[in-house]
Image (cartoon, grey):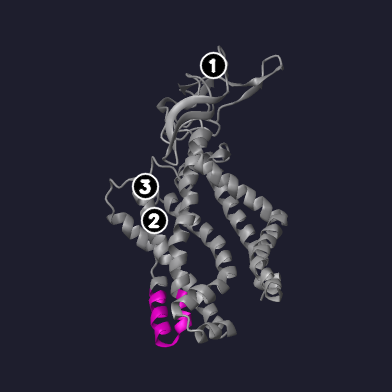
Amino acid sequence: MMQEATTAPVAVAPRRIHRSAWRKLWRDPIARIGLILLTLFYLSAALADPLTPYSMTYNDPDLGNAPPTTVYTQDEHGNWRWPYVRAMTRRFDPILYRQVYEEGSDRDFPVKLFVKGEDYRILGLIPGNIHLFGVEQPARIFLLGTDVNGRDSFSRLFFGAQKSLTIGFLGLFVAFPIGIVYGGISGFFGGLIDNAMMRVAEAVMSIPSFYLLIGMAAILPPGMSGSQRFALITVILSLIGWAGLARVIRGMVLSIREEEFVAAARAAGMPEFSTIVKHVIPQTASFVIVAATLQVPGFILAESGLSFIGLGIQQPDASWGNMLKYAQDNVNDLLKQPWLMAPGYLIFATILCFNAVGDVLRDVLDPKSQGTA
């Protein structure tokens, strides 16, 4: 009876700690806002096809560089109506010597919900053709205008998020397991093994990733698809990014290996690798979680920067980086067309949310703050 009473709390304590940690995370207003926004961003990216009126590659060449479509909610008499738009036409103004857009007034086109449109597959698996909203032809609804090829910028924001947001976690899944295990083994064994492994890590850290990617872009075949280029960028960034994490993990393990529970595991005859994986590496969890929340924005920024200078995701595939490149090509019109900077605003918001959540997680998951150190 006494043994059952003393062992029962040990089984539930970790669950209580995790529930308490998530409860504290959710109670923090800044972290809560960050989690909600990140959830919305990633759900929007995953459901880009049904949420947007057009596909990523849909274009109307007659409406290139069109301004955002005006959505009306009142008629000419000031009476409230269901939202509607008017068809837009382009003509050349010989006085201004440029293309201008005019709205027709002969017919109104109501904005419809759950309309049939282009066929798609959600995440490449679930087929469908229902879009959240749309209008009948010949009208178009471009909430953020179009690019030079007449592609809807609003829709491309969602499809661009699929690549810009995904690359962070793909890079994380490649770089972090390598860095954690590599640094754990190096710090645990020490001596010559530690010296040799750290020299390899330092050699990897010395590789200039930016120039490496430039060199790779120069030798890649021009016919490489956007998905292949996307995968290559992810792999290169990941294979370079693990070394810094490995050095930090190695330093933490050097101190953790002297703890009593590690000596007890050795005395019990546990294999060295099992001791590292089951007892040593979990003690670095607090740092790893914080590092992950900082590393994901780093991958997002790297992809966006490479696409911005033309070395990353290529047209017609969309990413926030190459959409910003289009804005940079029209830098003289940014004051008149602030919507061109929408991808930059989303990159800023995403990185800010990751940093806010990571800062709170560092405090919440600190073993000392849980009273379990």
Give percent across and percent down for residue 273.
Answer: 44, 77
Question: Can residue 311 be spotted in the picture?
Answer: no
Q: Amino acid at mark 3?
A: Ser
Element marked by disc 2: helix
Q: Secondary structure at mark 3?
A: helix
Relative side of 352 to 94, left or right? right
Query: Where in the figure is residue 262, as x and y percent of width and height?
Result: 54, 82
Q: Which residue is mark 3?
A: 227
Q: Residues within 10 Å of mark 1 (few under 14, many from 20)?
A: few
Left/right placement of residue 24 relative to residue 149 reads: right
Closest to the observer: 38 or 185? 185
Type of the residue with mark 2: Ile
Residue found at the very far top of the displayed protein: 106
Say which mark, if any, is on residue 161: none
- The quarter of the rendered structure image containing the C terminus is bottom right
State the quadrant of the N terminus.
Answer: bottom right
Three-letter code, disc 1: Gly
Q: Which mark is residue 104?
A: 1
Closer to the camera: disc 1 or disc 2? 2
372 drawn magenta: no
Q: Give the prevailing secondary structure in the magenta stretch.
A: helix
Give the magenta part as a residue range. 183-203
Residue topped by disc 2: 233
156 horizontally vs 39: left or right: left
Return the disc, 1 or 2, that comes first in the chain's sequence. Answer: 1
**Label 1: which secondary element:** loop
Q: How many marks?
A: 3
Disc 2 crowd rating (10 Å Cα; few below 14, some 14-19, many 20+) is many
Distance Cα–Cα, label 3 vs label 2: 10 Å
Q: Marks 3 and 1, Cα distance to the nearest angstrom?
A: 40 Å
Q: Is residue 186 magenta?
A: yes
